[in-house]
Amino acid sequence: MDQAVAAAVPVAAADRTPSPATAAAGQSPALPPPDAAGSTVLSGPVRLSTVPFGPAPPAAPEDARTQLTELEAFARQVAGCTRCRLHEGRTQVVFGVGDPHADLMFIGEAPGFHEDKQGYPFVGQAGKLLDKLLAGIGLERSQVYIANVIKCRPPGNRDPVPDEKEACEPYLFRQVELIRPKVIATLGNHATKQLSGKETGITRVHGQEQQIHVGSFDVLLYPLYHPAAALYTPAMLTVLEQDFARLPELLGRPVAAAEPAAPQLAAAVAAEPAVQLGLF
Ligand code: URA
């Protein structure tokens, strides 16, 4: 998706420091070793919507072919994951879906009941709202990439716990490095905190872009309210729609190197109101 260059990049910076379990500073996050199940054993279908069926498409540039192959191979590796307890109750790993070369990547929290059954992220009511918001800025699901912090459904759709997020983090970061989006829109608290590496909740940072590092890769982070939260809170939906409307402008910005943290974001790392739990 080619976007017109619309503005300079006065962005706040926040380096995403990988957790000690995943990477040394400045390095790509360390990938987990192949699981006991082996990288070729799949626990469920690996569905990348962009994996072509039927006759071979016209030859793509070398780097594009390599990227698709790597993402697909990576999805197959992740499909056999047994790194945390969530593999015991899942139907399948929900890796992600969309354009593997997308400029815009959305990251939600975790698969729910329907996502677990179907193998795709955001297929329930929250996903319908996401589709509607995308249509509002002239985009379709197939033009973006959608993934979650956690690739397996937590029982009863409970919030993911820290060791589950830590176990899945290398997968998410590698996914980002392979897709190389211009903008990552995090949906809700879990994704925003995971990508920013800060405890500042979504109520404070929604709509405020910041430059981050994901492994060796610089990308603009744009936190948004989670659509599931907005479904039940009209005021939140209005804010989400307003924040969403800025996405085309952000996508049009030239890609910039990371800058030092901006004061307002540093100052925002403070006590969170009680509503800052879960999706809010
Ligand atoms: N569906 C997902 O895939 N992720 C969420 O965070 C919510 C619903």
Image: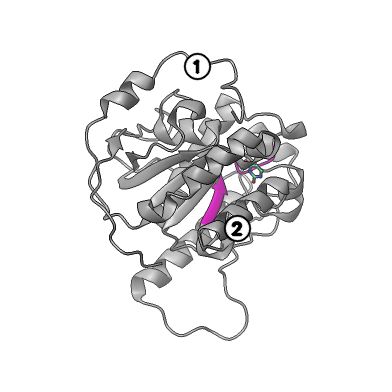
Looking at the figure, which quarter contains the C terminus?
A: top right
Residue drawn at the location 26% of the way across and 29% of the way down: 262
> Reading the chain from its start, which is encountered first: label 1 or label 2?
2
Is label 1's Cβ within 8 Å of ligand 1? Answer: no
Residue drawn at the location 60% of the way across and 22% of the way down: 277
Say which of 278 and 50 sits in front: 278
Give how far across and how far down residue 94 sits, in percent.
64, 50
Left or right: 136 as drawn, with respect to 268: right
Give how far across and how far down residue 179 sits, in percent.
43, 57
Say which of 107 and 67 sits in front: 107
Frontmost of labels 1 and 2 is 1
Q: Which residue is mark 1?
A: 272
Looking at the figure, which quarter contains the N terminus?
A: bottom left
Label 2: how many residues lie within 10 Å, few (<14), some (14-19) or many (20+)? some
Please name the colour scheme applied to the rendered image. Answer: one colour
Secondary structure of residue under mark 2: loop
Residue drawn at the location 48% of the way across and 62% of the way down: 100
Give how far across and how far down residue 209 sits, in percent.
37, 40
- Confirm whether residue 109 shows in the render: no
Left or right: 190 as drawn, with respect to 22: right
- Confirm whether residue 37 shows in the render: yes
Residue range in magenta is 145-153
Q: Which amino acid does the dot numbered 2 rest on?
A: Thr
Q: Which residue is mark 2?
A: 40
Classify residue 14 by image quadrant.
top left
Label 1: how many residues lie within 10 Å, few (<14), some (14-19) or many (20+)? some
Location of residue 130 with respect to 208 vertically, above or below: below
Location of residue 243 with respect to 145 vertically, above or below: above
Location of residue 205 with respect to 258 vertically, above or below: above
Give how far across and how far down residue 124 sits, in percent.
73, 49
Say which of 261 and 52 sits in front: 261
